Image (spheres, rainbow, N blue to C red):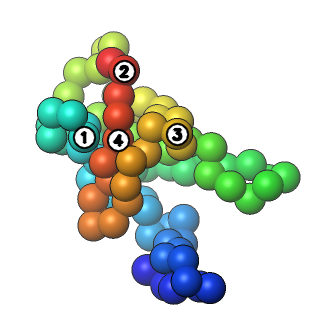
């Protein structure tokens, strides 16, 4: 993590492999395997998480940026599943 103009900045590649947990239940969801961003704005739109639990019988789920609560050593997200 780097500090740029008073903001903590993380390179997108540093997010890959970070474990994700559901903030309300503290259950591990899986690991970040992909990042989807807008080429026009350069902002992250969503992340793809390879799941370790069954969610709608999918191996990978997209999580919208607005549902990401915090990212550091782990990623905390709010899920509607």
Tell which of 60 and 45 is nearer to you: 45
Q: In this view, does 40 lie above or below 80?
A: below
**Which SS class for mark 2?**
loop
Give the CA separation, mark 3 to mark 4.
Answer: 9 Å
Snapshot quadrant of residue 55: top left
* Place of residue 53 in the rendered image (x, y in percent of width and height, measured from the top left): 20, 28
Q: Is residue 48 visible?
A: no
Which mark sits nearer the N-terminus, 3 or 2? 3
Residue for point 43% across, 45% down: 68
Which residue is identified by label 3?
Answer: 66
Q: To which residue does mark 2 refer?
A: 80
Residue at label 4? 77
Q: Is residue 22 left or right of residue 25?
A: right
Q: Which of marks 1 and 2 is nearer the N terminus?
A: 1
Instruction: Name the residue beneath numbered marker 1.
Output: 23
Q: Quadrant of the C terminus?
A: top left
Residue 60: numbered disc: none
Placement of 18 over or under 48, stated as above or below: below
Dot 1: what SS? loop
What whole-number distance in Å separates the C-alpha atoms at marks 1 and 2?
11 Å
**Residue at (27%, 59%) from the top-left corner?**
74
CA separation in Å, label 3 and label 2? 12 Å
Q: Is residue 17 left or right of residue 2?
A: left
- Label 3 sits on a secondary structure element that is helix
Q: Do the residues labelled 4 and 1 touch (CB within 8 Å)?
A: yes
- The tag earlier along the polypeptide, 3 or 1, is 1
Alpha carbon of mark 4 to alpha carbon of mark 1: how far?
Answer: 6 Å
Residue 71 appears in the rendering: yes
Mark 4 crowd level (few <14, some 14–19, many ≥20, 10 Å Cα): many
């Amino acid at each position: 993590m780097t500090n740029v103009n008073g903001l903590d900045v993380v390179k997108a590649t540093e997010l890959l492999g970070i474990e994700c947990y559901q903030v309300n239940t503290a259950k591990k969801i899986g690991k970040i395997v992909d990042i989807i961003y807008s080429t026009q704005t350069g902002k992250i739109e969503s992340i793809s998480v390879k799941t370790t639990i069954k969610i709608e019988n999918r191996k990978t789920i997209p999580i919208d940026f607005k549902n990401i609560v915090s990212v550091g050593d782990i990623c905390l997200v709010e899920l509607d599943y």
